[in-house]
Image (cartoon, rainbow, N blue to C red):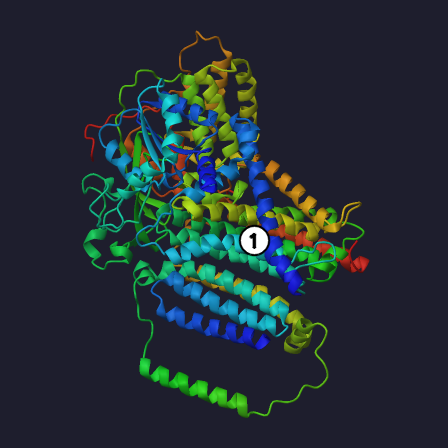
């Protein structure tokens, strides 16, 4: 137990940070290509930005709730690492919770608190608007996300991630639960405040939650954002993509490879959509997406009932 | 101290520059943007994000005090440059990392900052003790005379955190009592017209009341070509709509237009971008129901800009007349005010971005109203 | 080891609860309460009731996030950020609290708790659910959406004026040009 906990404390955060850096680099490279600059300069962007932010002064604002503000910034990375704790690498998990699926859900609800606190703590109008926008968006995606998380649980008959992974021996869940996968992927993007769902950091509100952050606080939030994105993408692997299953390579490597594939897909799709504003998203999420996800759940339940287990 | 030196060098590889455009100097600003992209740098989205402040043009009128307020909010290490022409652009940009790396200079500069609100040294703080939330791009209390709706002064004797009074309350558009905040939007804000300031009274993020202030344009030696301004307007609207990759593509095309590079590739690139914007159903859904001031749907306006730009590219250069579609009805400040009151901040930003550089304004007899 | 951990969470829960009344800002009070609830959730997980513990943590964080918004909204800025004394009847309630605490503590030590018979079930969550709801499980599942609908309906009825006023009292007002749905001044996502 102590060996794995030492490994967890060291390996996991490093792994998450490394993958987050890779994702940020890839994003930077794609942005550089849009700008017409060489892709090389985009790749190194996270590195230069990190150095710049390490050197930059932090800001304090009169009347700001600094305690909550700084805690929220540091909390993003912690939430990401906590999420990754339950992911199985082959037969091995750092934390084999019998309710691993619900644990993930609890950790992404932690993000609600963190993003709002980031907005509130700064005592600035733009920041506050960003924080509230995140909550408005969260109310829209959370119910579809919870239902989408229930689908693999029904398919496997268990909330333990090792069981969910084992239930995909014959057929990966993504094949017969595509709607759940898409809703899950969209929710991952949404709770990272990234891509089409980055309203909390939107350019139209002067950077939103980021508008008053500088120095190490800004680095923690920007890095934490990518860490959460990586954690969410990594979680989709045992849920929908068969976990560590695959020929030739060991299971843990396959988990990382599949995570990278999911991240690549998200990075590619990000450029196709403009920002979705929460007031527009709300009606779509409640009136269209929730019924569709419920239908998906019904299909899964019928299949499991008829088949006596997963396909 | 190899590590410190290495970090310092790395820290100045990708400078974030906050560009301030003095109204009338948009060509200079566009050149600055091209140069910044070429150096691998990035435009900052706000003073907290900025390393350097680049003022394009010589500021006059109320601008110098606004720029000082923004300068005070930029964290160290920082550098400030005023550009007057494109000739000195490259030198000015090369100076920036040199100044940022100069530790002695930066420490001296940091020593001139105010530590608390009552500190006597350094530039004025961006907010005074009359109940505003702290820094916004413009430095709240620049609202010149007390014409603004400053009722908070009168009934708030209680001082809140850090001595800043708390917000008052008022009925919002649905009849709920909401807190009132005052926010001056612009002029130093990315993707915002450089000559416009909207002093807004907000209930949460809904604009309850607004006062429009326009900064007079100074005479610029050279105006950018119409093609460039059309693409610039479209890029601005797309950036406010949150579609950064496409806005970056348009910014690149705009840069190529004014520097005259890669002219053959311009047409297919612009056509591709136009097709992408036209086909995007998410953009159509996102902009649906938002009307540009005194003129149909916002999306139609955006597509008209891009279509006209494509026509200008494809038609022979002697067709210099600005086509009908972009010449607009004159609007007054009241028209803009009516269009944004009752709308929330994101829609307000979109409506203002839909104005375009060629928007003719009714000249007001009185500058402050 | 488990005793220390349990004690830590217990102290955290109580400290969080006290902090709710001591801090000045509504946001801090809300999140102090959240910390307290999360500590309770952790204690429940330590009792091997994993599902209930993790769900408690999940629901409490979500609820506190929403509650912070409502606290700031309804209490306005003044009590939200300024020192406000939320305690009433200080002496009487302190006496009552101490008396109840002593009574409960005495009860815990004096009552002869029954010894364990048999062994814990394999799936504690399932057996707990069976014990609480038993044969009424289907009823409980059906009642919860009804409860939710009642809450929403109550809010709608209590709202003195809202955006649906444009439909009139009987929800059948038409616009002057015969359109069945009067325009929503603020367009929602579907554009009805």
Residue B163 in the figure: left or right of residue C181: left
Q: Is residue C67 above or below residue C186?
A: below
In depth, the one of C102 and B207 nearer the eye is C102
Res. A260 image quadrant: top right
Query: Is residue B153 in view from this perspective?
Result: yes
**Which of A172/C135 is in front?**
A172
Circle 1 chain: A
Quadrant in which the C terminus of chain B is drawn: top left
Could you tell me which residue is drawn at 70 percent across and 78 percent down? C120
Kindly indicate the quadrant of the structure image that contains residue C143. bottom right
Q: What residue do we see at 25% from left, 32% from top?
A: B64
Residue at 57% x, 42% y is: A21
Q: Which residue is mark 1?
A: A80
Q: Quadrant of the N terminus of chain B?
A: top left
Q: Position of residue B43 (x, y in %)?
A: 42, 32
Q: Position of residue A153 (x, y in %)?
A: 69, 59
Which quarter of the figure has residue B281? top right
A36 shown above or below B50: above
How many discs appear?
1
Residue A271 as seen in the image, left or right of residue C128: left
Return the x and y of residue A137 as percentages of the image width and height: 50, 49
A216 horizontally vs C144: left or right: left
């Amino acid at each position: 137990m102590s060996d794995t906990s030492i490994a967890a404390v060291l390996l996991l955060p490093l792994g998450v940070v490394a993958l987050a850096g890779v994702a940020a680099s890839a994003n930077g490279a794609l942005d550089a290509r849009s700008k017409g600059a060489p892709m090389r300069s985009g790749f190194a962007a996270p590195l230069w930005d990190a150095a710049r932010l390490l050197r930059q002064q932090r800001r304090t604002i009169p009347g700001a709730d600094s305690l909550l503000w700084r805690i929220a910034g540091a909390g993003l990375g912690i939430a990401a690492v906590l999420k990754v704790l339950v992911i199985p690498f082959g037969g091995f998990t750092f934390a084999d919770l019998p309710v691993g699926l619900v644990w993930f859900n609890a950790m992404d609800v932690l993000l609600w608190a963190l993003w709002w606190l980031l907005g509130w703590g700064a005592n600035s109008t733009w920041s506050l608007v960003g924080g509230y926008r995140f909550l408005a968006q969260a109310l829209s995606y959370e119910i579809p996300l919870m239902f989408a998380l229930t689908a693999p649980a029904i398919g496997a008959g268990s909330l333990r991630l090792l069981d969910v992974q084992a239930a995909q021996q014959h057929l990966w869940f993504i094949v017969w639960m595509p709607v759940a996968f898409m809703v899950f992927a969209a929710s991952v993007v949404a709770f990272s405040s990234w891509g089409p769902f980055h309203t909390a950091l939107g350019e139209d509100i002067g950077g939103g939650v980021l508008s008053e952050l500088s120095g190490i606080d800004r680095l923690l939030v920007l890095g934490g954002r990518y860490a959460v994105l990586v954690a969410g993408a990594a979680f989709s692997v045992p849920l929908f993509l068969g976990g560590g299953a695959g020929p030739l390579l060991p299971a843990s490597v396959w988990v990382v490879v599949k995570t990278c594939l999911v991240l690549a897909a998200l990075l590619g799709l990000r450029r196709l959509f403009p920002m979705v504003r929460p007031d527009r998203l709300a009606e779509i999420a409640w009136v269209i997406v929730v019924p569709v996800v419920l239908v998906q759940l019904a299909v899964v339940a019928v299949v499991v009932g008829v088949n006596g287990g997963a396909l | 101290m190899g590590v410190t030196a290495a970090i310092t060098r790395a820290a100045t590889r990708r400078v974030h520059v906050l560009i301030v455009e003095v109204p009338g100097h948009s060509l200079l600003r566009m050149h600055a943007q091209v140069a910044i992209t070429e150096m691998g740098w990035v435009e900052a989205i706000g003073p907290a994000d900025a390393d350097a402040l680049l003022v394009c043009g010589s500021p006059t009128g109320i601008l110098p005090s606004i720029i000082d307020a923004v300068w005070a909010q930029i964290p160290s290490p920082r550098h400030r440059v005023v550009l007057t022409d494109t000739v000195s652009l490259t030198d000015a940009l090369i100076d920036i990392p040199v100044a940022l790396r100069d530790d002695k200079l930066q420490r001296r500069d940091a020593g001139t900052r105010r530590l608390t609100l009552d500190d006597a040294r350094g530039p004025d703080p961006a907010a005074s003790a009359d109940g505003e939330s702290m820094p916004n791009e413009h430095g709240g209390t620049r609202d010149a005379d007390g014409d603004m709706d400053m009722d908070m002064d009168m009934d708030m004797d209680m001082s809140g955190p850090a001595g800043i009074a708390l917000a008052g309350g008022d009925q919002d558009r649905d009849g709920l009592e909401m807190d009132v905040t005052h926010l001056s939007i612009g002029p130093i804000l990315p993707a915002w017209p450089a000559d416009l300031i909207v002093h807004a009274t907000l209930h949460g993020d809904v604009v309850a009341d607004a006062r429009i202030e326009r900064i007079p344009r100074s005479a610029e030696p050279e105006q950018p070509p119409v093609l460039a301004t059309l693409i610039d307007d479209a890029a601005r609207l797309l950036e406010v709509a949150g579609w950064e990759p496409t806005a970056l593509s348009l910014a690149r095309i705009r840069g190529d237009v004014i520097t005259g590079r890669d002219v053959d590739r311009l047409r297919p690139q612009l056509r591709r971008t136009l097709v992408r914007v036209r086909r995007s159903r998410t953009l159509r859904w996102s902009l649906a129901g938002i009307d540009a001031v005194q003129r149909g749907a916002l999306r139609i306006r955006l597509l008209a800009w891009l279509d006209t730009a494509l026509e200008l590219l494809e038609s022979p250069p002697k067709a210099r007349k600005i086509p009908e579609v972009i010449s607009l009805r004159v609007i007054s400040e009241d028209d803009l005010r009516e269009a944004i009151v009752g709308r929330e901040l994101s829609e307000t930003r979109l409506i203002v971005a839909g104005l375009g550089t060629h928007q003719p304004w009714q000249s007001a007899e009185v500058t402050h109203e | 080891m488990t005793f220390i951990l349990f004690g830590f969470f217990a102290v955290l829960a109580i400290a969080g609860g006290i902090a709710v009344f001591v801090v000045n800002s509504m946001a801090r009070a809300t999140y102090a309460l959240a910390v307290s609830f999360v500590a309770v959730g952790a204690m429940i997980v330590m009792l091997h009731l994993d599902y209930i513990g993790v769900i408690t943590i999940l629901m409490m964080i979500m609820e506190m996030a929403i509650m912070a918004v409502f606290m700031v909204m309804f209490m306005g800025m003044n009590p939200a950020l300024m020192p406000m004394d939320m305690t009433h009847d200080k002496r009487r309630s302190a006496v009552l609290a101490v008396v109840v605490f002593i009574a409960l503590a005495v009860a815990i030590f004096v009552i002869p708790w029954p010894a364990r018979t048999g062994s814990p079930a394999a799936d504690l969550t399932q057996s707990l659910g069976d014990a609480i709801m038993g044969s009424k499980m289907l009823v409980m599942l059906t009642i919860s959406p009804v409860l939710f609908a009642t809450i929403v309906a109550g809010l709608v009825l209590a709202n003195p004026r809202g955006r649906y006023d444009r439909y009139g009292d009987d929800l059948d007002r038409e616009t002057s040009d015969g359109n069945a749905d009067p325009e929503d001044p603020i367009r929602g996502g579907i554009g009805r």
